[in-house]
């Protein structure tokens, strides 16, 4: 092995070049963890989300979750457009069948998306070594926000609004957190080779 600065021969095991004093970069041997593909893209995340729709065990990476989350928002925008178009048609006195078809198409699609997203959230929590039961706390938080919104003109409006905001920020921090690099109580880190 030669020094990258002065091209003189380096004594094996040295950390610095004996000739010029430059630090020696030691190339590490490839590990098993580095050889496994641990990244996932947009289309792969969508496929994994729908193929693991009833899998509450194991782990899902941060990239897998956020790519599917982006897909969910795009899909919800499309479904919301269908729902709104159907509602406008119905309330404007348009053809009843057309409005009903728009709404009847949007509702099951939204339900399917919710059913697919719940196990993905549980697996994402598993990746940061948290129980999937924390998802219940998030749903209660959402219900609290809805409750506060519905009764904002009553005595409930005196409830401090910052508590749900802190809860959402806490939730966001968890879902942005990098998963455990090693095996945790929920299994090995997610790998994305051979359709797994």
Image (cartoon, helix red, strand yellow):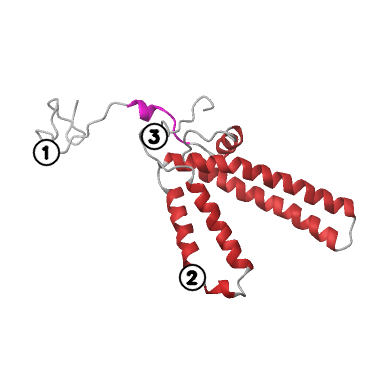
Q: Which residue is mark 3?
A: 185
Mark before the other along the chain sequence, 3 or 1: 1
Q: Is residue 171 above or below residue 67?
A: below
Image quadrant where one finds the N terminus: top left
**Rendered image quadrant of residue 34:** top left
Q: Which residue is mark 2?
A: 160
Contact (Cβ within 8 Å) of mark 3 with mark 1: no
Horizontal side of 45 relative to 186 (left or right) equals right
**Rendered image quadrant of residue 51:** top right
Contact (Cβ within 8 Å) of mark 2 with mark 1: no
Q: Position of residue 66 (x, y in %)?
A: 52, 46
What range of the chain is rendered magenta? 31-39
Q: CA distance from mark 2 to mark 1?
A: 63 Å
Element class at badge 3 = loop
Between 84 and 184, which is closer to the camera in this rendering? 184
Q: Nearer the viewer, mark 3 or mark 1?
A: 3
Q: Which residue is mark 1?
A: 21
Horizontal side of 23 relative to 75 (left or right) equals left
For mark 3, does the 10 Å Cα neighbourhood hold few (<14), some (14 to 19), or many (20 or more) residues? few
Mark before the other along the chain sequence, 2 or 1: 1
Q: CA distance from mark 3 to mark 1?
A: 46 Å
Q: Position of residue 21 (x, y in %)?
A: 11, 38
Mark before the other along the chain sequence, 3 or 2: 2
Q: CA distance from mark 3 to mark 2?
A: 37 Å
In the rendering, which numbered label is found on residue 170?
A: none
Q: Which residue is painted at 53% across and 36% down in the image?
A: 56
């Amino acid at each position: 092995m030669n020094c990258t600065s002065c091209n003189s021969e380096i004594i094996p095991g040295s950390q610095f070049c004996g000739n010029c004093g430059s630090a020696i970069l030691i190339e590490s041997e490839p590990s098993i963890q580095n050889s496994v593909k641990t990244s996932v893209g947009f289309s792969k995340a969508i496929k994994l989300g729908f193929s693991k729709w009833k899998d509450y065990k194991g782990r899902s990476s941060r990239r897998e979750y956020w790519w599917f989350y982006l897909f969910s928002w795009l899909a919800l925008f499309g479904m919301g457009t269908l729902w709104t178009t159907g509602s406008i048609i119905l309330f404007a006195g348009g053809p009843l069948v057309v409005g009903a078809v728009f709404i009847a198409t949007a509702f099951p699609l939204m339900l399917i998306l919710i059913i697919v997203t719940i196990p993905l959230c549980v697996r994402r929590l598993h990746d940061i070594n948290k129980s999937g039961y924390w998802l219940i706390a998030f749903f209660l938080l959402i219900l609290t926000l809805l409750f506060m919104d519905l009764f904002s003109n009553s005595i409930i409006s005196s409830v401090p609004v910052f508590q749900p905001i802190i809860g959402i920020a806490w939730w966001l921090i968890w879902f942005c957190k990098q998963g455990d690099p090693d095996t945790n109580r929920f299994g090995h880190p997610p790998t994305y080779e051979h359709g797994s």
